[in-house]
Amino acid sequence: MTGGFSLWHWAIVALVVVILFGSKKLPEAARGLGRSLRIFKSEVKEMQNDGNSQANPAADPNQSAQLPSAPVDATVVETPQQPRTEPKSA
């Protein structure tokens, strides 16, 4: 046999896992792993959807249309300055 696991190898691995973790904790561990994988899968899908919606904003109908902002008025308003008076020295 070269590099592969036979049925006996998998049976021994399963037996070792049952002995190490116990039969009561294995269903809890399987449920926890399943939940984690579902959460991971939904997060990956959400990240892919976010990437697609940012690349093509017209593709997401739920996204509200953004109106262009008003141009910023860049005129400078100068305030009148009072003439400087030199302090009187005594």
Image (cartoon, rainbow, N blue to C red):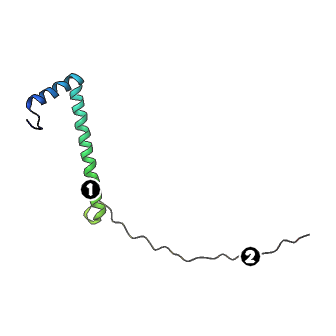
Query: Which quarter of the rendered picture does the C terminus lie within?
Result: bottom right
Instruction: Please state, as top left, top right, bottom left or bottom right, where the N terminus lies in the image.
Output: top left
Q: Residue at x 46, y 74 (%)?
A: 71
> Does residue 84 sit above or below 57 in this rendering?
below
Residue annotated with mark 1: 49
Report the disc number at residue 35.
Answer: none
* Amino acid found under the numbered disc labelled 2: Gln
Residue closest to the far front: 2
Which residue occupies 29% across, 53% down? 47
Residue 76 versus residue 32 in the image, above or below: below
Q: Position of residue 41 (x, y in %)?
A: 24, 46
Which secondary structure, mark 2?
loop
In this view, the mark in front (2 or 1): 1
Residue shown at 23% from the left, 23% from the top: 20
> Looking at the image, which residue sits at the far right?
90
Q: Is residue 35 above or below residue 41?
A: above
Res. 52 image quadrant: bottom left
Residue 34 locus on image (x, y percent): 22, 37
In the depicted view, which residue is nearer to us: 27 or 22?
22
Position of 90 with respect to 25 (left or right) is right
On residue 82, the disc is 2
Give neighbour class at mark 2: few <14, some 14-19, many 20+ (Cα, 10 Å): few
- Labels 2 and 1: the sequence-earlier one: 1
Q: Residues within 10 Å of mark 1 (few under 14, many from 20)?
A: few
Q: Are marks 2 and 1 in contact (CB under 8 Å)?
A: no
**Residue 37: which quarter of the image?**
top left
